[in-house]
Every structure is written in C-alpha cells, then in structure tokens.
Amino acid sequence: MIVTCGEAVVDFLPEPDADGRPLFRPVLGGSLYNVALGLGRLGVPAAYFWELSTDPFGTWLASELEASGASLAHTTRGDRPSTLAFVDLSGDEPHFQIIDAGQTMSTLDPAGLGPLPPSARLFHTGSAILALEPGGTAIERFVHETAKTVPVSLDFNVRPPSIRDLDGYKARLDRLVGSATIVKASAADLAVLEPDMEPDAILARWRTQGVPLGIVTLGGGGAIAATADHWIRLPAETVTLKDPVGAGDAFMTGLFARLWERNALDRTALGALGEADLTDAIAYAQKVAGFVCRHAGAVFPWRADLEANDPTAAAPGD
C-alpha cells in the first residue's frame, strides 16, 4: 500500500461568465489528496493519512476518495473547516491563495493519527505543509522516523505564499532529501529555492547525497531522472492544455503506479531498475500528467481512460 500524508483542499477555479465576470467553480484538490485519489483510480492500493472535515466540503472529499478506491481507514474526521484555495491561472504556473481557517495544514501532527498500516510500502509527502509551523516540524520528525522502516517519497511542490522563512524551509527540504528514497521537484520549485542552479546540477547533487531516484520535471521541456546507474531525459508529451492544476501530482501518481507494478519502491529495487524500465515509468508518469492537463482542475484518470488512449476521455465527475 502507498500512503500519502498532506493537505486536502477545495480549489476554486476561475471560469468567467458570458460577460467576462469571474465566477469560481469548486473542484477537489490538494497535492497529497490528489495522489491518493489518483492511485485508487489506477488500481493501486492507497491510503490517505490526514484529517478531513465533517463539513460538507470534507464529506465531498471523503466520498470521492472512497469512490476512487483509496482507503479512508487511516483518515480521521474533525470539526475544523475544510481548507479552501482560490486559483489564479493567469501565469505559467497556477497560483493558490489558500484559506486554512481551521489551521489543519499548519498544525496537524501525523503522529497523532496512529501508526501507519502494516502493509505500507511507501510513505509520500511534501507540498505547502512543510513550510508551515508547527506542523512542518511535526511532519519532518514523522518522516525521519518513518524512513527507518518504510521508504519515503518527497515532492517539493513549493507554494511560495506559504513560505515565511525561506532559508529554514530550504534547510528542511535538504534534511528530508537525506531521508527520502524518491525525490521530485519541478523547475518552478527550483526557481524559488535555487535560482542560480540549473536543474541538472540539482539532480546531480541529489545523486551525490545518495537519493535512489531523483526527478526534475521541466514543464514543456519534459523531465530528467537519475538513479545511481542511469540518467535519462524525456521530452514532454504534446497536449492541448486546459490548465496545469494537479499535473505534478498526476506525474507522481503515474510514477508510483508503474513502480508498484514492478515492485520497485524501495532502495534496493530502484537501484536495480534498468534504463528501459526507468524510461517507461517516467513516460507513464507524463501520460497521467498529460491527461490531467487536458481537463479543468485536477481530474484524474481511471485506468480504463489511459488504456483507451483517448486524449478526450474524461474521468467521471469532470
């Protein structure tokens, strides 16, 4: 089972009316929520390790997760209001104005949720929660402890409005990289964190730090990935872009699905992964991300959508 730990958010996407006035449509999101939901739809055992509200938005989030086949057995429910975000799509990257009235993102300590399921084979986290306090400190502590027995995946997924102490945040990410088995960042993430370093140099640094699989996604430039023995660069899929919301989460979903099929989620198996299998895993990750980019909001495919190879196929609820 793949366990994801991090925020669930109801995103409000701008959709101008006939007169050009902004209207906002709610869609489900949140980086770690998205990955759990996406894995469930692809038939991969997944559990969501977080707290969801008992309010109507939280009930919607829980029901969609369950309908997608992900486990809620390790999801707690509370009376704090759901986290909301208004999305600005005017730039190259989505900008999220997050409203976390219940402070779930900034205060939740995963240690209070109970132990991970015994069947956990990967623990995945990242995103805005790592920049917020005191929750960021609690999650970092939990990750380091978890990494002693379960492989950890880290997706930087930087959210600049959440960062109050850039140097402290960068130091935390660097420490977490030291505990991680899989590390992924986008070029946009690295432009915030290391504006004077090229993505290839960052990937090489992770390799030197002993990260078994490091990945940098480059938007329209494709993706680069490295293990101890292989370094690959793949061009981007050609897609008719609707919006990029959830694309990075979809990439991780596809990557995990392929690695799960190959039983290649731990350090030893990743070290033995051949170049062809690594290339296939990254290509599949791009395929899942491409599907999401063709739809408004983070609409994740079911396995049948991808097998049909129909770029216009929509997931239920789109």
Image (cartoon, rainbow, N blue to C red):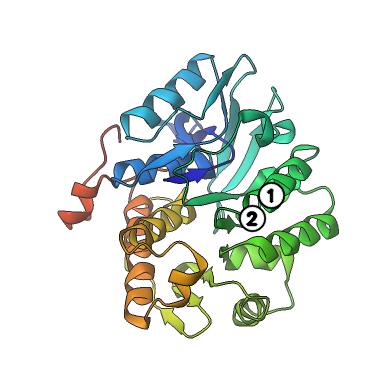
Q: Is residue 169 shown left or right of residue 277?
A: right
SS category of the residue bearing label 2: loop
Q: Amino acid at mark 1?
A: Glu
Residue 31: image location, x then y, percent: 53, 45
SS category of the residue bearing label 1: helix
Name the mark on residue 145: 1
* Residue ID at (32%, 72%): 280
Residue 234 seen in render: yes
* Residue ID at (32%, 35%): 69
Q: Amino acid at mark 2?
A: Lys
- Seen from this angle, which residue lies furthest left? 308
Q: Nearer the viewer, residue 102 or 221?
A: 102
Q: Residues within 10 Å of mark 2 (few under 14, many from 20)?
A: few
Q: Quadrant of the C terminus?
A: top left
Q: Nearer the viewer, residue 93 or 156?
A: 156
* Residue ID at (36%, 43%): 45
Q: Is residue 192 shown left or right of residue 116?
A: right
* Residue ID at (44%, 81%): 233
Residue position marked by numbered label 2 in the rendering: 148
Find the distance from the CA under tag 1 to the CA under tag 2.
Answer: 6 Å
Residue 241 seen in render: no
Q: Nearer the viewer, residue 136 or 191?
A: 136
Q: Are marks 1 and 2 in contact (CB under 8 Å)?
A: yes
Q: Is residue 293 shown left or right of residue 309?
A: right
Q: Residues within 10 Å of mark 1 (few under 14, many from 20)?
A: few
Q: Is residue 273 above or below residue 64?
A: below
Residue 145: image location, x then y, percent: 69, 49
Residue 63: image location, x then y, percent: 38, 23
